[in-house]
Amino acid sequence: MTDPAFQLPKPVVLAVDDTEDNLFLLTHVLGDVYQVRTASNGAEALKEVASDPLPDLVLLDIMMPGMDGYEVIARMKSTARTKDVPVIFLTAKADAKTEKKGLELGASDFISKPINPDILLARVRTQLALKSVSDILRDQNEFLEQEVRRRTSEVLAIQEEKNRVNRLYQESLENAKSELEQKVEQRTAFIKRTFGRYVSDEVVELLLENPAGLKLGGESRVVTVMMTDLRGFSVISELLHPEKVVDLLNGYFMDMNKVIHAHQGVINEIMGDGMLVLFGAPNQRPDDADRAVACALEMQRAMASVNERNALRNLPELEMGIALNTGAVVAGNIGSESRVKYAVVGSNVNLTGRVESYTLGGQVLATEGVLRAATGKIETDREFKVSFKGFAAPVRVYEITAISGAHNVRLPEDKTVLRPLSNPLDVSFQILDGKLASGEEFAGSATRLAEKEMVISSETPMEEYMNIRLFIGKPGEGKKNDFIYAKVTDVAEGGNYNVRLTFVPPSLKENLKRIMEQNRRPA
């Protein structure tokens, strides 16, 4: 058993942010592995970096009242004691201008807000590893200089007696020195190139083991791609204070990250409230498709605990749609010599995005490629064909409800009951093209109603999977800022349409509950 007295101290990370929630998240995520000190403004940050022990890494918010992050890093880099301390900027404005200014001031990396715990841990780990290597190289350089001076002195002493030996020794010494300096230059260049480029643990490990992995380019490989998105989150973000939005997303991403990590998925990108997750890149495994399916189902099950926590914190309920697709993509380093990103591109990535746009909250939709690649038994609820934009042939899509075999996961049974209304409810709707409404309102009536579904009767024809904006009342009567987002899920005879309510604002949610209680007849 190792004597505690001989254990190495934890690396010191200084977290600087003027938002308590962000400091709490940084401390919570990093506290088990590192000694985390905090500062809430620029002045406190400079005091902390001036105190002992010197931080090994600084996580620095850019936008702070008084002294902003740019001024803090400028003062650090102008001081001999702190100029070599790596700094990762935390920013909600990750544009090219911000990154250029930060890099010119000496920043090592950037982390976008809202903060993703996996990305945070990966980049902190990488920067601390690189700093450790840099410190070792600096010590080696000092040692080499001392060694050169010592050996040169010996050579000069021997030279007086044995000129021939001196010449041979001098030649071998110069060769050894040249080789050592070349290795130092190569390793230093490698460290500089790797700063801030990769986010996942697997990519970082591959690069540290194989520096050739930094070269631009990619390779074709079969990958299972997952895309997720929160239904109606654009409206939710408009209704909430920005801090509440960040709090909501951080809690959601934290729970989803745990599930993805448990299934060995790699979060390649976070796009607002959506995620791009890879199974099969950068490392391939024979059960990539099975793990992706199991992960997607577990993520949907985990949404129950996410929403339980949201309810306790007076935050809105979230619903997530997930799409899966297995196929050949190009995976590798994409970008330029100054900025490289590990990514996947190709038609199969685009297809995953198209399928995701058809998902409902709580759904996992997958292509035939996933079912062919998976070795476990997959259960589906329904299947349909869609002609996606940019794809010549219709694509068959499946709604996955369970997987068994090496992974055993099943979604909870849908117990939705559409009850007939004794008095049909007047509604009107607009047809959506992407995020844009047609403008014209069409009349209809709701004849059956559930918490998240309704049956609409209308003379206006609608197509399956069409997105609509729904108002309570006849055309022109509904409040323009009080509307429901919905998707047509089934087209029946006689102008009847099953509609899934993808987002209902709190004001209308209570109204619909009251209507179901007061204005329904037995099924």
Image (tube, rainbow, N blue to C red):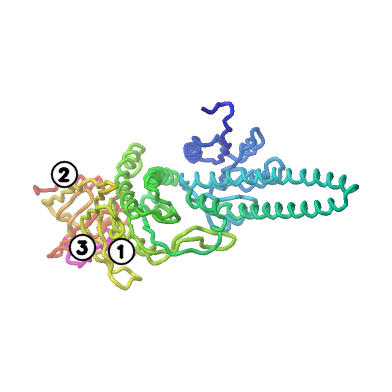
Query: SS of the residue at dot 1?
Result: strand
User: What's the magenta region?
Assistant: 457-469
Query: SS of the residue at dot 3?
Result: strand
Q: What amino acid is labelled 2 in the image?
A: Glu
Tell me where residue 99 sits by quadrant.
bottom right
Q: Position of residue 240 (x, y in %)?
A: 39, 46
> Is residue 51 in view from this perspective?
yes
Callout 1 crowding tier (Cα within 10 Å): few <14, some 14–19, many ≥20: some
Q: Nearer the viewer, mark 2 or mark 1?
A: 1
Q: Residue at x 24, y 51 (%)?
A: 401
Looking at the rendered structure, which numbered label has been put on residue 443?
A: 3
Q: Nearer the viewer, mark 3 or mark 2?
A: 2
N-terminal label among 2 and 1: 1
N-terminal label among 3 and 2: 3
Residue position for label 1: 432
- Residue furthest toward the bottom? 392
Query: SS of the residue at dot 2?
Result: helix
